[in-house]
Image (tube, rainbow, N blue to C red):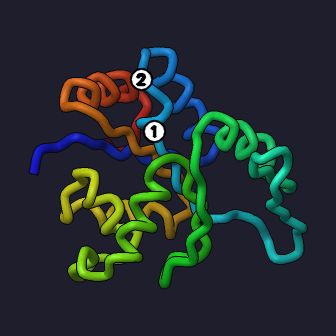
């Protein structure tokens, strides 16, 4: 399978947002970017997600960052993933995961999240590492496009990535 996508792992939503901004400044189209992160917050803390003026909004400790991310990327979903928990996905990855869940034959031993990643070109061998990153409260940024675009994205992010 040709590699037309890459995933980078970040410690926080703020770092993921900064990566998206770097990619956009380099000319990468925002409709080719996605973010996935496990919902963070303590049980004693109030966290709210709501729709305002046709845009999802967040209230809580991560509100400022998530409002920026959701303002940049179109499409979002909240998934409850076995073994991982609640995961927010913004960008086209949310639609790919939903498509895989609707067509269970695509899953072929992968989780719905993993099948969504695999459907855009992420190799099976890397998917468990990305799911482990979510379990460890890290954030994923996915960039997809032509091989040249993905190579450019990889170079743009190379100096600050944990894994690409």
Q: What residue is shown at x 49% (from left), y 84% (from top)?
A: 82
Between 116 and 25, the one lying in front of the other is 116
In the displayed structure, 63 sits above or below 86; it is: above
In the displayed structure, 11 sits above or below 106; it is: above
Q: How many marks?
A: 2
Q: Position of residue 68 (x, y in %)?
A: 71, 36
- Give the quadrant of residue 131: bottom left
Q: What residue is shown at x 30% (from left), y 30% (from top)?
A: 154
Q: What residue is shown at x 61% (from left), y 47% (from top)?
A: 12
Q: Is residue 86 visible?
A: yes
Q: Is residue 106 left or right of residue 24?
A: left
Q: Position of residue 163 (x, y in %)?
A: 34, 45
Of callouts 1 and 2, which one flags the residue occurring earlier in the amino acid sequence? 2
Q: Is residue 47 left or right of residue 65?
A: right
How far is disc 1 from disc 2 in space, using C-alphas? 8 Å
Between 97 and 53, the one lying in front of the other is 53
- CA neighbours of label 2 inside 10 A, class few (<14), some (14 to 19), many (20+): many
Q: What residue is shown at x 56% (from left), y 25% (from top)?
A: 21
Q: Which mark is residue 28?
A: 2
- CA neighbours of label 1 inside 10 A, class few (<14), some (14 to 19), many (20+): many
Q: Is residue 146 left or right of residue 162?
A: left
- Give the quadrant of residue 144: top left
Which residue bears the numbered disc 1?
A: 33
In the displayed structure, 78 sits above or below 63; it is: below
- Give the quadrant of residue 96: bottom left
**CB under 8 Å between callouts 1 and 2?**
yes
Q: Is residue 132 visible?
A: no
- Tell me the element at label 1: strand
Q: Position of residue 5 (x, y in %)?
A: 28, 43
In the displayed structure, 143 sits above or below 56; it is: above
Give the farthest residue toward the left: 1
Q: Position of residue 75 (x, y in %)?
A: 57, 50
């Amino acid at each position: 399978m040709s590699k037309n996508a890459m995933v980078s792992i970040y410690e926080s939503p703020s770092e993921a947002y900064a990566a998206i901004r770097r990619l956009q400044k380099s000319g990468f189209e925002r409709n080719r970017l996605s973010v996935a992160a496990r919902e963070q917050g303590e049980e004693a803390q109030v966290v709210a997600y709501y729709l305002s003026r046709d845009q999802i909004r967040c209230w809580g400790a991560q509100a400022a960052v998530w409002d920026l991310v959701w303002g940049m990327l179109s499409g979002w979903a909240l998934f409850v993933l076995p073994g991982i928990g609640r995961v927010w996905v913004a960008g086209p990855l949310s639609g790919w995961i939903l498509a895989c869940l609707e067509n269970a034959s695509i899953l072929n031993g992968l989780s719905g999240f993993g099948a969504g990643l695999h459907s855009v070109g992420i190799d099976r061998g890397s998917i468990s590492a990305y799911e482990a990153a979510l379990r460890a409260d890290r954030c994923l940024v996915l960039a997809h496009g032509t091989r040249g675009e993905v190579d450019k994205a990889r170079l743009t992010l190379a100096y600050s990535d944990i894994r690409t």
